[in-house]
């Protein structure tokens, strides 16, 4: 209760001080308030608060409109440039990816692996054709050094090549899900 | 007979300048607002404020440390009233405070208004009910009397006063608070 009374009294005093400051008191009330200022420190401080509040509100309606938009515009400008830069970089990256000039490392590595696998496969079929055509002479001096690719002990295609060729197959022919001929082992 | 050592020197009869400077930092701004409320003129306020602190330098040693703020306000009040009597200006002529902040600052190096306070009050203004905000703007910004406001808004005078008072309580509570985005 005491706290409430104190708050109410302070608000009353602040209101009286504001009315005095605003020139809303009649002559008698104004003189009484001025006389009170001679001895009452609370009334003096209330008058100082009333002036502060009134000037601050007036400034909030005028000066602040002049100051803050400039600050806001500056920050907006920086933010806008930042977003434009980010957007430009993103667009450039997408364009480069789309054009194929650059790409993720896994993509190029997969490409070279598939090329190796295709070369391996081509060599293997060439050897088979040569053998079938009877162009390969056995019993020569180099027989021991020649690998018989048609034999059962032919080296198995490495798993990474199979995987790479599967990828090529999936890329080149979406209709065919079977692996290329001759590479079904493993 | 008084010996020369018993007579206080000029330095001893004055308050230390660092003490006066500290008092100015602590109470100068509030004292300036108080004087502006009485004198309604920034230049007069600056003159009286200076005279008040000159008196503090000259006679401050007679005061007790805990009562110096009240002493400053009392001296400032009497100086202001004396000035008004001398100049023949009264409350009827000095009807309102110069709300213009550049006038209010009076060329002093200490700003009356701090940007953060203005921002806090501005934010508080936005949160006021529209009818209260309207009365505040009309009274303080457009400098209309409550009678005029009541007439223009077609509301009783008591309603206009009530809206203004309620708004001031809210704005005052916000005045010394930091801006919302700093909390």
Image (cartoon, coloured by chain):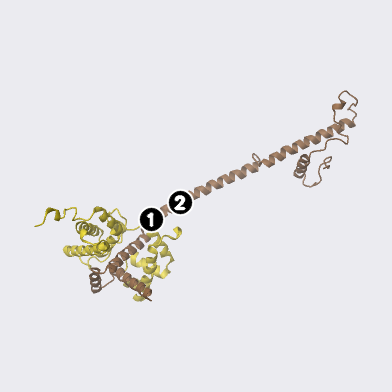
Would residue B126 be found to the left or right of residue A184 on screen?
A: left
Chain yellow in the figure, letter = B
Would residue A169 be found to the left or right of residue A34 on screen?
A: right
Task: In the displayed orientation, state which residue is furthest to the left.
Answer: B1
- Local secondary structure at mark 1: helix
Q: Please report the residue visible at 27 percent of the width from the left and 72 percent of the height from the top.
A: A25
Eyeballing the image, is A20 above or below A105? below
Q: In this view of the protein, which residue sits in the foreground, B120 or B90?
A: B120
Eyeballing the image, is B45 above or below A43? above
Q: Hey, which quadrant is residue B46 in on the image? A: bottom left
Residue at label 1?
A66
Would residue A119 be found to the left or right of residue B123 on screen?
A: right
Q: How many marks?
A: 2
* Quadrant in the picture for the N terminus of chain B: bottom left
Q: Is residue A88 visible?
A: yes
Chain brown in the figure, letter = A
> Residue A172's spot in the image, x, y percent?
76, 43
> Residue A101's spot in the image, x, y percent?
64, 39
Residue at label 2?
A75
Q: In this view of the protein, which residue sits in the foreground, B13 or A107?
A: B13
């Amino acid at each position: 209760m005491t706290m409430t009374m104190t708050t109410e009294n302070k608000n009353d005093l602040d209101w009286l001080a504001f009315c005095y400051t605003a020139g809303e008191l009649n002559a008698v009330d104004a003189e009484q308030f001025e006389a009170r200022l001679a001895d009452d420190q609370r009334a003096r401080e209330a008058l100082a608060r009333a002036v502060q509040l009134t000037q601050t509100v007036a400034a909030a309606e005028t000066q602040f409109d002049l100051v803050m938009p400039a600050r806001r515009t500056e920050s907006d400008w920086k933010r806008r440039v930042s977003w434009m830069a980010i957007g430009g970089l993103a667009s450039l990256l997408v364009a480069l990816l789309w054009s194929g000039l650059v790409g993720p490392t896994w993509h190029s590595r997969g490409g070279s692996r598939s090329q190796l696998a295709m070369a391996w496969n081509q060599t293997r079929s060439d050897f088979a054709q040569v053998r079938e055509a009877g162009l390969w002479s056995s019993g020569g001096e180099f027989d021991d050094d020649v690998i018989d690719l048609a034999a059962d002990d032919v080296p198995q295609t490495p798993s990474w090549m199979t995987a790479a060729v599967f990828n090529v197959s999936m890329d080149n022919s979406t209709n065919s899900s079977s692996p290329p001929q001759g590479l079904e082992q493993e | 007979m008084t010996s020369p050592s018993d007579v206080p020197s000029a330095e001893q009869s004055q308050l230390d300048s660092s003490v006066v400077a500290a008092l100015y930092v602590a109470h100068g701004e509030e004292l300036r607002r108080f004087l502006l409320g009485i004198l309604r003129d920034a230049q007069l306020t600056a003159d009286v404020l200076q005279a008040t602190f000159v008196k503090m330098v000259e006679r401050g040693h007679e005061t007790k440390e805990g009562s110096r703020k009240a002493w400053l306000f009392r001296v400032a009040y009497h100086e202001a009233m004396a000035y008004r009597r001398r100049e023949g200006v009264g409350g009827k002529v000095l009807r309102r405070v110069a709300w213009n902040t550049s006038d209010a600052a009076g060329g002093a190096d200490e700003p009356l208004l701090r940007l953060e306070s203005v921002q806090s009050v501005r934010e508080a203004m936005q949160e006021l009910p529209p009818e209260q905000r309207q009365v505040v703007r009309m009274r303080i910004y457009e400098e209309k009397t409550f009678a005029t406001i009541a007439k223009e808004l077609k509301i009783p005078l008591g309603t206009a006063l009530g809206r203004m008072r309620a708004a001031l309580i809210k704005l005052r509570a916000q005045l010394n608070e930091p801006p919302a985005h700093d909390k």
